[in-house]
Image (cartoon, rainbow, N blue to C red):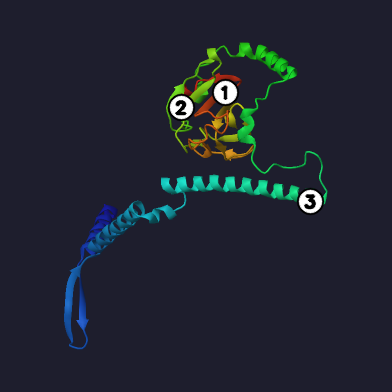
Amino acid sequence: MNSDKKNKESKKQFKSRLLRKYRLTIHNENKLENVLGFYVSPFWVIISLFFSFILVGGVVLLIFIFTPIGEYLPGNISTRTREMLVNYAITIDSLKEEVDKQDKYLANISSIMAGNYETGDTIAKNDTLPNVGNHPITASDIEKEYISDFEEKERYNLTSYATSVGALTGINFYRPTRGMIIERFNPKTRHYGVDIAESPNESVVAIWDGTVILSDYTATDGYVLMIQHNEDLVSIYKNCYRILKNVGDKVIAGEVIGSLSSGDEENSSNAFKPYLHLELWHRGAPLDPGIYISF
């Protein structure tokens, strides 16, 4: 009983001290008079400080949201800034390639003028890749025989092309690029992916985290990227106009890995195709990208 009484008395005293009013006075020493005076209590001081913190925090938050100051925070980049960075990266990559070719060209010219050159040592000044399509590369008899044997062995592994894979159903894949699907997955016609009509200068992004295992140029599919993901999944991106990643590079979901054409390169190469071809392979079997990705 005594402890309960003491607790009640202590609570009553605390409440009394909290609500006790104090007079604050501003005194003029020259006139020896009080200029201003008002009463305050500890309770109202606490309430005032609380709402002041909320008001200041709200103002700071609005400044970061609705002004460019927010872009200077780590990890907060606007869409326009991200697009500029991608364009700069593409431009720098193109300039680096041109500088390397010019350096090789000048080095070869110097060697020729000095008489120190070997047959086949000269590097062409102009990039000959766009003209590869004008000279079709035919497979040799050995290559044809190997391809035929390989297809015969693997033919019976492709019996369940569009079967849903349980390990992949809960993954949120990124859309590789913006555009309309013009040809869907159809293993009967040996079309093991989807074709997405490209928009000029559109970027190509990785659908999921992974590691680049192939970054190359082919006469039939243009620039090709292949990424190894978890869950034994491999994604393949064909008909890219430019690629920004090399073999061994780590990528994250949604990261830009290449770009599509500007729409003016159709006549520069027979290998040019105005669409992105995306394939998904799981443990040696092709999957329908339309089942797992929202286009």
Quarter location, residue 234: top right
Of tags 1 and 3, the one toward the viewer is: 3
Which of marks 2 and 3 precedes in the sequence?
A: 3
Instruction: Tell me the tag on residue 281.
Output: 1
Residue 7, percent from left and from top: 28, 55
Give the quadrant of the C terminus: top left
Left or right, 110 with reference to 158: right
Residue 22, percent from left and from top: 21, 70
Can residue 78 be seen at all in this image of the molecule? no
Q: Which residue is mark 2?
A: 293
Residue 175, percent from left and from top: 46, 31
**Residue placed furthest toward the bottom:** 30
| Element type where label 1 sits in the image | strand
Left or right, 277 with reference to 24: right
Quarter location, residue 14: bottom left
Judging depth in this view, the residue of 116 and 291 nearest the camera is: 116
| Disc 3 to disc 2, C-alpha distance | 57 Å
| Disc 2 to disc 1, C-alpha distance | 14 Å
Of tags 3 and 2, the one toward the viewer is: 3
Which of marks 1 and 2 precedes in the sequence?
A: 1
Q: Which residue is mark 3?
A: 113
Residue 63, percent from left and from top: 33, 56
Q: Amino acid at mark 2?
A: Ile
Q: Residue 160, relative to residue 6: is it above or below?
A: above
Q: Amino acid at mark 1?
A: Trp
Which of marks 3 and 1 precedes in the sequence?
A: 3
